[in-house]
Image (tube, rainbow, N blue to C red):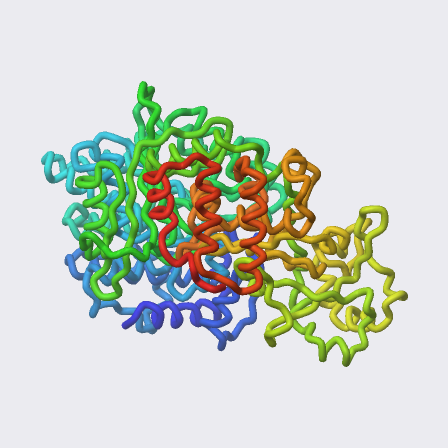
């Protein structure tokens, strides 16, 4: 019988007598569950007898998972001939005997399939949004194996050293840990000591805040001991259920040290945490900076709990390497000096997490060598130089053959793709600066560009993000010319809007596509401040906004504000800024694609726009009029040299796309370019905007390369680094 059918049958039976099960399995964990975390349950189990709250739905589902895990254990006991009675099963799982009339047999499953049933209880059937709320993602076996290998947890150390999984989920890490521990018992001929090592010395510990995960992880451990013939009697199973150090506790609140800490901590953003918990985190962790994610605190806590010479290895989102909120954890790790290895997996999609992952390994020891082993693996368009059929082969190649430099791997068995794999020794930046690592040659070129700059982009441009409404379905998506005419919206509240897809390299395309939109923008600028237009001054727009008030008033940050109105856009920008000549870029794109806008259109929140400042650069080119000045800078921004710099300081996202942010753009170096060359660039850009091509872009690139004093060899490295696909028309 398949696992989801068993889970479904159990869910319905438990639902019919839910009061009994709630009395026996209720836990404080479920009190904080929100409606959007249980949508997957409504989809999976639509025909319930008792309608439950979100909290009770999650409890109902969790008990079903506990019972499914119990059914797996019973199947293994039967196969091994371990005798038990109904009372003993009740001690393992209260109420399970009530299920005797329900078909929950797994007799047709292999041992590997039984393991998969246990692991799948974390994610199978649970949609992405619900997993994001709980921060739960299953880590592939190949990655777990690699992580255990690089910290050196093997059959020799496993029987004497302590190891902790700080967020065990349904036991995917623990499964490989217990298997290595059991191998150590047999290799060292000390199998009779397994209970003492597990229950008294607590060599393997695990934590999770969800009670069902704690139970399933215990079943994972017990199942491995049963399969390897270490547990042969039901009394030993009962001992393990009672005493295994798998705790329903928040790892961030514990104080016990360990020799090894390994796992995949939850990814939970600041806004999804209860206020009280948020305050606790902020008061106790230096890594809780900005709009932080909870996994940064797991990194800090894990490092602090290492014994002398202990090792920590966690897989997390890679955003902390470059995001603003990562400044706290970057500063902590830099100061601690414990980072030994960093493996950035970029957009490789080794598993279905909603984030781009990175593996970090730290060691609590003093080191005279401050260099870190950095490995980057990301998708590429070049031809593969060698073949790796799976992740195990790829990691073995990286660790055993690629000592430094770069290689291109044809990866996969059926659905093949090419990965760019690079390895180098890097130094961790101090003071929380962003971590952007590459080969030493590429870092040398970046350093040279910084040294050759006249100023930085922040000195010559104001960089602003476009308008974020948080209700585009109301303010943007319906706003065609016909829709505006039908509703007779007042002109003072409607403006043409540049969306991401309107931004091409060099120019803006608007008015030619059915996707083009206006924005309903109920704001005006008074003395440099944006304020809401009173609804009585825009009655037609007001009528429409009132019709949409149910949605708009749910935006509590506006509806509950004493200084804002419920019908405003969340992040308005000054009209006077938009009405200037400006340069616009998308926020996520695979190569530099800046465009000139002289129409005064407004910009959406997935774009950035740049307006000039009075600066030293303006004084360098007094003979350029405004249009020429902007064209000159547009040519500079779209050059290959600047694209190289952006890709050096910005982490790759997915499909070779990069995020352009205010903080990164502000860092771009602006070289001193001869006046005659500036005029030439402006002329070439004018021609490019008009649709000419030829060798104009290459000519601009050469001027910029010369301004940075780059050699032919350095230019070749730049153009190899930024790769193909630069001429795509976005």
Q: Residue at x 65, y 58 (%)?
A: 597
Q: State the image coordinates of residue 362 (x, y, percent, origin top left).
A: 35, 31
Q: Quick one: 605 or 113, which is closer to the camera?
A: 605
Q: State the image coordinates of residue 569 (x, y, percent, origin top left).
A: 72, 58
Q: Residue at x 27, y 72 (%)?
A: 1
Q: Residue at x 81, y 68 (%)?
A: 491
Q: Is residue 336 above or below residue 21?
A: above
Q: Is residue 485 above or below residue 568?
A: below
Q: Quick one: 365 or 678, which is closer to the camera?
A: 678
Horizontally, is 570 left or right of 698 in the view? right
* Residue 265 seen in the figure: yes
Q: State the image coordinates of residue 701 (x, y, percent, origin top left).
A: 45, 47
Q: Quick one: 612 or 431, which is closer to the camera?
A: 612
Rendering quarter of residue 462: top right
Horizontally, is 554 left or right of 455 in the view? right
Total numbered labels placed on residues in the image: 0
Rendering quarter of residue 333: top left
Q: Is residue 702 above or below residue 548?
A: above
Of all residues shown, which one is farthest toward the right?
A: 536
* Residue 245 seen in the figure: no
Q: State the image coordinates of residue 667 (x, y, percent, origin top left).
A: 54, 38
């Amino acid at each position: 019988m398949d696992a989801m059918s068993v889970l479904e049958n159990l869910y319905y039976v438990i639902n019919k007598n839910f009061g009994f099960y709630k009395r026996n399995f209720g836990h404080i964990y479920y009190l904080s569950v929100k409606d959007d975390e249980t949508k997957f349950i409504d989809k999976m189990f639509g025909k319930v007898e008792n309608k439950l709250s979100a909290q009770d739905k999650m409890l109902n589902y969790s008990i079903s998972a506990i019972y499914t895990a119990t059914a797996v254990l019973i199947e293994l006991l039967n196969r091994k001939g371990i005798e038990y009675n109904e009372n003993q099963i009740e001690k393992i799982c209260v109420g399970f005997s009530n299920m005797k009339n329900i078909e929950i047999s797994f007799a047709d499953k292999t041992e590997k399939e039984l393991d998969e049933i246990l692991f799948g209880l974390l994610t199978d059937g649970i949609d992405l949004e619900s997993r994001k709320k709980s921060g739960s993602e299953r880590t592939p076996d190949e990655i777990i194996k690699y992580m255990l290998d690089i910290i050196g947890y093997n059959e020799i150390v496993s029987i004497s050293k302590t190891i902790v999984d700080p967020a065990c989920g349904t036991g995917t890490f623990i499964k490989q840990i217990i298997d290595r521990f059991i191998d150590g018992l047999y290799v060292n001929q000390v199998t009779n000591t397994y209970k003492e090592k597990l229950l008294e010395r607590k060599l393997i510990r695990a934590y999770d805040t969800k009670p069902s995960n704690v139970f399933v992880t215990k079943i994972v451990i017990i199942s491995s001991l049963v399969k390897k013939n270490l547990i042969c009697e039901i009394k030993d199973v009962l001992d393990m259920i009672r005493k295994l150090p798998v705790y329903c506790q928040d790892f961030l609140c514990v104080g016990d040290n360990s020799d090894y800490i390994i796992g995949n901590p939850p990814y939970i953003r600041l806004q999804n945490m209860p206020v009280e918990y948020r305050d606790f985190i902020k008061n106790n962790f230096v890594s809780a900076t900005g709009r932080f994610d909870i996994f940064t605190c797991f990194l800090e806590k894990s490092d602090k709990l290492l014994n002398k010479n202990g090792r920590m290895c966690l897989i997390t989102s890679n955003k902390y390497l470059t995001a603003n909120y990562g400044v706290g954890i970057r500063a902590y790790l830099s100061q601690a000096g414990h980072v030994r290895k960093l493996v950035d997996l970029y957009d490789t999609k080794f598993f279905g997490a909603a984030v781009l992952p990175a593996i970090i390994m730290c060691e609590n020891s003093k080191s005279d060598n401050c260099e870190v082993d950095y490995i980057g693996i990301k998708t590429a368009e070049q031809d593969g130089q060698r073949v790796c059929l799976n992740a195990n082969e790829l990691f073995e190649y990286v660790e055993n053959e690629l000592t430094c430099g770069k290689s291109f791997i044809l990866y996969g068995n059926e659905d093949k793709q090419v990965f760019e794999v690079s390895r180098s020794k890097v130094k961790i930046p101090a003071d929380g600066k962003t971590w952007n690592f590459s080969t030493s040659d590429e870092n040398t070129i970046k350093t040279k560009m910084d040294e050759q700059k006249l100023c930085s982009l922040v000195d010559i441009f104001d960089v602003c993000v476009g308008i974020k409404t948080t209700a585009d379905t109301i303010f943007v998506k319906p706003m065609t010319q016909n829709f505006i005419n039908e509703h007779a919206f007042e002109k003072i509240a409607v403006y043409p809007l540049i969306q991401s897809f309107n931004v091409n390299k060099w120019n803006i395309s608007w008015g030619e596509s059915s996707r083009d939109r206006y924005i309903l923008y109920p704001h005006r600028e008074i003395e440099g401040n944006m304020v809401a237009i009173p609804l009585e001054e825009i009655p037609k727009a007001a009528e429409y906004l009132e019709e949409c008030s149910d949605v708009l008033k749910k935006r509590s940050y506006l509806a509950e504000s004493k200084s804002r109105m419920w019908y405003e856009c969340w992040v308005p920008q000054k009209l006077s800024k938009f009405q200037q000549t400006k340069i616009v870029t998308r926020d996520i794109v695979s190569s530099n694609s800046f465009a000139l806008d002289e129409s005064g259109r407004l910009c959406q929140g997935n774009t950035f726009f740049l307006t000039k400042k009075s600066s030293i650069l303006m004084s360098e080119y007094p003979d350029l009029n405004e249009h020429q000045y902007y064209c000159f800078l547009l040519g500079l921004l779209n050059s290959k040299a600047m694209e190289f710099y952006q890709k050096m300081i910005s982490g790759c996202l997915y499909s070779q796309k990069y995020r352009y942010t205010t903080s990164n753009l502000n860092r771009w170096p602006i070289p001193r370019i001869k006046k005659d060359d500036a005029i030439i660039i402006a002329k070439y850009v004018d021609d490019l905007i008009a649709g000419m091509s030829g060798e104009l872009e290459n000519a601009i690139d050469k001027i910029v390369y010369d301004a940075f004093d780059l050699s032919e060899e350095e230019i070749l490295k730049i153009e190899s680094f930024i790769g193909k696909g630069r001429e795509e028309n976005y």
